[in-house]
């Protein structure tokens, strides 16, 4: 139960500044689409609102239709409630273009009204892609198609210490605007009100865990290693699943709160689809685009954290000099550099990896920075990068085929791109690893490893155990 209202932020005399108003009139452009609905989108600057409280209260009005997103710098937090427009694509080779075209179609707009535009506000899509649209689908992921993007009805954007509330809805006739505003205003008042959440909500609950075919997984690592040695491919990422069983439904707010606290150097994401919620804390950026600046990240090669500073440094040095991990990493750098150099005019890539340390694991890390060419869109970069050899392998097509044939698991959205895109093609995508699909009182967790010629099944298996830890801890385990 949520406790009482303490202070109402809208009726408390707080000034609301409309900084953005865009009424998108596509039908004015094209006579033959005169029946298409129009988009009304406007953004208000609001007093500080706690994003997780906003997410929790939002469940009352938009159950099963929420998302949460924050990135490692914690500078931008996005919380979406309600799906005012949904774009879905299944089993299409062109799923990236399909999403982009549909988004542009909706956005044919009068941009002049957006003088004070802030990145991450206004009309926005949040969503993701499955790892492989051609993998045989199982019941596990039946609520998640191969691409799904939503424009939230209400969205909170926390940017540094400023908060914005964006309202988006589609309408056909002018009269509908007022009706919709009347419906949404009391909800907004409630969402912008300060609440005290009961502290118990941060506790986890016990669970039972089953590993899905661990011995078969080790066997598949061996087989793939042999194929690599025969020269069929250079690297393949193999993933496995564990299933958890709880007595009660999992509280998604608790999981997000735990992930944010325990994994501050990761992207925390959650995407609800009815009773299912895909959630995770991924350290790996696929691509970020802010105006013409783009950033990608090569993160591959792993070792555990030490228990003392000395031990931790020793592990770090071991990783920096380990042949198997260096190969795992170099394959990723090579592919990302190649894809990014096609999209960019100028590229900066350090010549050697450094270490990226999180609570449970340390990785080899190489950032890639570029200035994107004029006509290159964010989603076209996502397409050219997905999957990087940190998630798929190299060469790309051969590796995906091997994963499709070898893995028993249905990856669904695990290891796919997840993130957001605004009306000016700014946005950010992470790769959805260290993630779980929550299904009421059950959950599937996923973790994979880059397999190269020198990989050993037992040590790769141990690496997946470390990679399960962030989600296990957030769900109340270890
Ligand atoms: C595929 C995963 O991690 C990737 C990212 C970083 C390091 C990796 C590795 O060392 O194997 C993996 O390529 C996962 O966590 O499920
Ligand atoms: Mg590895």
Image: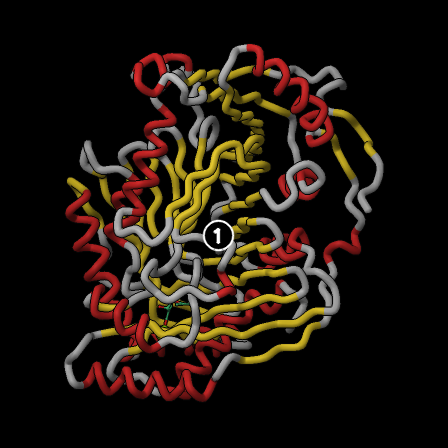
Say which of 316 and 245 sits in front.
Answer: 245
Where is residue 282? Give x, y as percent.
Answer: 46, 58
Is residue 398 left or right of 10 when viewed as pictured? left
Which residue in the structure is indicated by mark 1? 267
> Measured along the vertical axis of the image, is residue 323 above or below residue 271?
below
Task: Give the image quadrant in which the ligand numbered 1 is located.
Answer: bottom left
Q: Is residue 85 left or right of residue 92?
A: right
Residue 36 x %, y %: 41, 22
Residue occupying image coordinates x 74% and y 64% = 248
Between 389 and 359, which is closer to the camera in this rendering?
389
How many other residues sit within 10 Å of disc 1, few (<14), some (14-19) or many (≥20)?
many
Residue at (58% x, 31% y) in the render: 154
Q: How many marks on residues?
A: 1
Is 27 positioned to the left or the right of 334 in the image? right
Mark 1 residue element: strand
Residue 362 seen? yes
The quarter of the rendered structure image containing the C terminus is bottom right
Q: Nearer the viewer, residue 471 or 333?
A: 471
Task: Decide: is 477 above or below 221.
Answer: above
Q: Quadrant of residue 58?
A: top right
Residue at left offset 82%, top offset 32%: 6
- Image coordinates for residue 35, horizontal then vertical, percent: 41, 19
Instruction: Judge whether residue 320 can be spotted in this image.
Output: no
Residue 182 place in picture, x, y as percent: 67, 18
Q: Is mark 1 within 8 Å of ligand 1?
A: no
Say if 115 sits above or below 379 in the image. Answer: above
Which residue is depicted at the point 41% across and 18% down? Answer: 24
């Amino acid at each position: 139960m949520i406790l009482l209202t303490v202070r109402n932020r809208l009726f408390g005399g707080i000034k609301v500044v409309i900084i953005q108003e865009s009424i998108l009139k596509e039908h004015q452009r094209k006579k033959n689409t005169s029946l298409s609905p129009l988009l009304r989108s406007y953004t208000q600057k609001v007093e500080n609102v706690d994003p997780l409280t906003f997410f929790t209260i939002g469940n009352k009005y938009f159950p099963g239709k929420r998302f949460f997103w924050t990135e490692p710098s914690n500078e931008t937090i996005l919380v979406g409630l309600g799906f005012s427009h949904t774009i879905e694509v299944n089993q299409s080779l062109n799923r990236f273009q399909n999403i982009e075209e549909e988004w542009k179609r909706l956005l044919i707009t009068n941009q002049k009204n957006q003088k004070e535009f802030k990145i991450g506000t206004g009309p926005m899509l949040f969503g993701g892609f499955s790892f492989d649209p051609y993998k045989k689908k199982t019941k596990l992921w039946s609520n998640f198609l191969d691409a799904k993007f939503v424009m939230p009805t209400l969205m909170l954007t926390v940017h540094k210490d400023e908060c914005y509330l964006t309202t988006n809805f589609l309408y056909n006739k002018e009269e509908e605007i007022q009706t919709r505003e009347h419906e949404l205003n009391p909800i907004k008042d409630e969402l912008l009100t300060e609440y005290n959440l009961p502290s118990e909500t941060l506790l986890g609950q016990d669970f039972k865990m089953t590993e899905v075919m661990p011995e078969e997984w080790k066997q598949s690592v061996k087989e793939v290693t042999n194929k690599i040695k025969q020269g069929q491919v250079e690297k393949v990422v193999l993933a496995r699943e564990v299933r958890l069983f709880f007595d009660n439904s999992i509280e998604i707010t608790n999981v997000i709160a735990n992930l944010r606290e325990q994994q501050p150097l990761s992207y925390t994401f959650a995407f609800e689809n009815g009773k299912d919620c895909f959630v995770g804390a991924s350290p790996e950026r696929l691509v970020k685009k802010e105006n013409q600046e783009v950033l990608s990240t090569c993160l591959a090669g792993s070792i555990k954290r030490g228990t003392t500073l000395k031990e931790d440094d020793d592990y770090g040095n071991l990783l920096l000099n380990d042949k198997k991990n260096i190969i795992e990493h170099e394959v990723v750098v090579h592919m990302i550099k190649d894809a990014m150099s096609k999209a960019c005019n100028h590229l900066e890539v350090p010549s050697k990896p450094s270490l990226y340390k999180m609570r449970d694991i340390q990785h080899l890390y190489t950032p890639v920075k570029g200035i994107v060419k004029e006509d290159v869109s964010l989603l076209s970069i996502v397409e050219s990068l997905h999957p990087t050899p940190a998630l798929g392998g190299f060469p790309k097509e051969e590796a995906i085929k091997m994963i499709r044939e070898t893995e028993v698991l249905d990856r669904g959205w695990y290891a796919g791109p997840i993130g957001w895109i605004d009306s000016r093609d700014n946005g950010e995508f992470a790769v959805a690893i260290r993630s779980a699909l929550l299904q009421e009182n059950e959950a599937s967790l996923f973790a994979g490893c880059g397999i190269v010629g020198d990989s050993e099944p037992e040590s790769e298996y141990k690496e997946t155990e470390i990679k399960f830890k962030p989600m296990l801890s957030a769900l109340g385990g270890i």
